[in-house]
Image (spheres, rainbow, N blue to C red):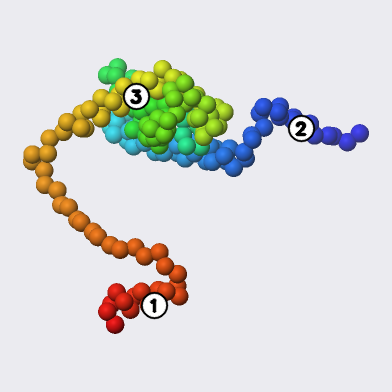
Amino acid sequence: MSEGKIISLKKREEISEDPLTELLRTGARQLIAQAVEAELHGFLQEFATCTDTSGRRQVVRNGYLPERKIQTGVGPVSVRVPKVRDKRGKGVKFNSGLLPPYLRKTKSIEEMLPWLYLKGISTGDFQEALQALLGKDATGLSSTTISRCKRLWETEHEQWSQRRFENKRYVYIWADGVYFNIRSDDARQCILVIIGV
């Protein structure tokens, strides 16, 4: 009897509905991981001179924080941020500039929320709308979250509408034009009339 290969079949819910989107998510996950690793490398280089008497580094890499999902334009992407350990006890901590500790959605998603609201999506329908746009795994945007964002937008709008213009200078450009909706046969005659020939 020949040696056979056992191939496990994925469950129906594990099969990606859109392989291109899954490929984009995988690429995004890898790109984010590489960028955060480069950030960590630069951070550890800053503390390369912090050594003990035997020459061992005192600020070292120490595993990862728990994995979390970030909502992006291609759907949720799982990310892992590395941790560092300060053996001196001075509390040196690595915080990624790319993935701040409380980041849950990208800027493009945050910019899309007010646009959807202004287009008439009610707070209760946001979850369904985002699932249609970002995929079935779009989470973390409940009606309470949208209501909280709405209050923040109203505050920002109020501050914006009451800003002062006293110390600012603005340049205005006025343009005027004429639009003719004519067929190409009449175009030559019209141009000749305008020019005055």
The percent coordinates of residue 81 (x first, y second) are 43, 28
- Between tags 3 and 2, which lies in front? 3
Horizontal side of residue 157 vs 162, given as left or right: right
- From mark 1 to mark 3, how far is it between C-alphas? 55 Å
Asked which secondary structure carries label 1, the reply is helix
Q: Amino acid at mark 2?
A: Ile
For the residues labelled 2 and 1, say whether their Cβ atoms are less than 8 Å apart.
Answer: no
The percent coordinates of residue 58 (x first, y second) are 33, 24
Horizontal side of residue 17 vs 36, given as left or right: right
- From mark 2 to mark 1, how far is it between C-alphas? 72 Å
- Between tags 2 and 1, which lies in front? 1
Asked which secondary structure carries label 3, the reply is helix
Q: Amino acid at mark 1?
A: Arg
Residue 175's tag is none
Residue to which mark 3 is pinned: 150
Q: Residues within 10 Å of mark 2 (few under 14, many from 20)?
A: few
Residue sitting at x 71%, y 27%: 11
- Between tags 1 and 3, which lies in front? 1
- From mark 3 to mark 2, how far is it between C-alphas? 50 Å
Residue to which mark 1 is pinned: 188
Asked which secondary structure carries label 2, the reply is loop
Q: Which circle's residue, 2 or 1, is located before the other in the chain?
A: 2
Residue sitting at x 25%, y 60%: 176
Residue to which mark 2 is pinned: 7
The percent coordinates of residue 38 (x first, y second) are 39, 38
